Image: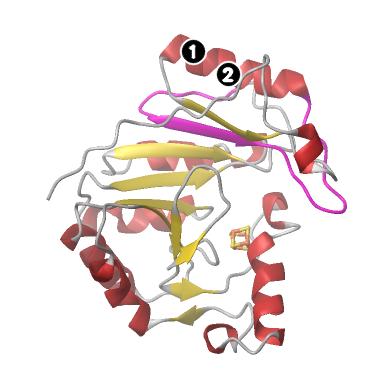
Amino acid sequence: MSQTKIEWTELTWNPTTGCDKVSQGCKFCYAEVMARRLKAMGQEKYKNGFKLTLHEDALRIPYTWKQPKIVFVNSMSDLFHKDIPFEFLQRVFEVMNDNPQHVFQVLTKRGNILFNYHKELKWTHNIWMGVSVENENELERIDLLRKTRAKVKFLSLEPLIGPLPNLKLKKINWVIVGGESGRRPRPMKAEWVYEIHDKCLKENVPFFFKQWGGTNKKKTGRLLYGKTYNEMPEVQINF
Ligand code: SF4
């Protein structure tokens, strides 16, 4: 496990590392940059760099956490990558099923693979399933998520690089919005954010505004209408 600066979670847990790019949102993939850096620093877990790698030994980690945690699963990969064997995916789900005291936030850009597998996975209440959507081209991911048996469904609209006028929030329990940061960030227009926020208000969906982004994300900050939006779904803790 690792502490993280990601605003909407507490810890990251990476039973796999590495990935391949699938859409525009992947262009400046943070995980790719980090994986290469960690490889250069000689970290054993990242000896394959950004090549997809399974980490059997990581499967025991959630059993060692003494206090309930909110955990982002696979911040350095995508749990629904096509090269992850279904048996390994099932084992990751078993770990999450076995640890209902923790909330596991799983986020994918591979809505099609998620949909193909969802009936064969056990969706306990502590597994929050999300899809990333960066522009209108990827709205199908949301339709596929909606059809799954996941009990809590969320959207990460980050990096938001286009407007989402056709976004529908039926059966969606949480929305995160954020702009791209880094050296060459693609801009996020304020009106795109206002429109999504309005829809969340209307549909009573918790809204989390992560950041405006840009080349100096500290300066642009995360205020919207002069306040921070840190809403989340209600966490059910079961022991
Ligand atoms: S799906 Fe996620 S982890 Fe994989 S390349 Fe794209 S942004 Fe990176």
**x 47%, y 9%: residue:** 202
Q: Mark 1 points at which residue?
A: 201
Q: Which amino acid does label 2 sit on?
A: His
Q: Which amino acid does label 1 sit on?
A: Leu
Q: Please say whether residue 179 is one of the residues in the magenta stretch.
A: yes
What element does badge 2 sit on?
A: helix
Q: In the rendered view, would you say 45 is above or below 157? A: below
Query: Is the residue marked 1 within 8 Å of ligand 1, measured from its CB?
Result: no
- Image: magenta residue range: 166-189
Q: Which residue in the rendered view is the most extreme toward the front? A: 66
Determine whether the residue tagged by mark 1 lies in a helix, strand or loop.
helix
Name the image quarter holding residue 223.
top right
Is 144 on the left or on the right of 141, as rendered? left
Name the chief secondary structure element in magenta: loop
* Residue depicted at x 20% and y 49%: 124
80 or 65: nearer the viewer: 65
Mark 1 is surrounded, within 10 Å at the Cα level, by few (under 14), some (14 to 19) or many (20 or more) other residues, namely few
| Left or right: where 60 falls relative to 111 | left
Report the Cα–Cα distance between label 2 and label 1.
6 Å
Q: At which x and y percent is residue 122?
A: 19, 55
Numbered label attached to residue 197: 2
Residue 151 position by quadrant:
top left
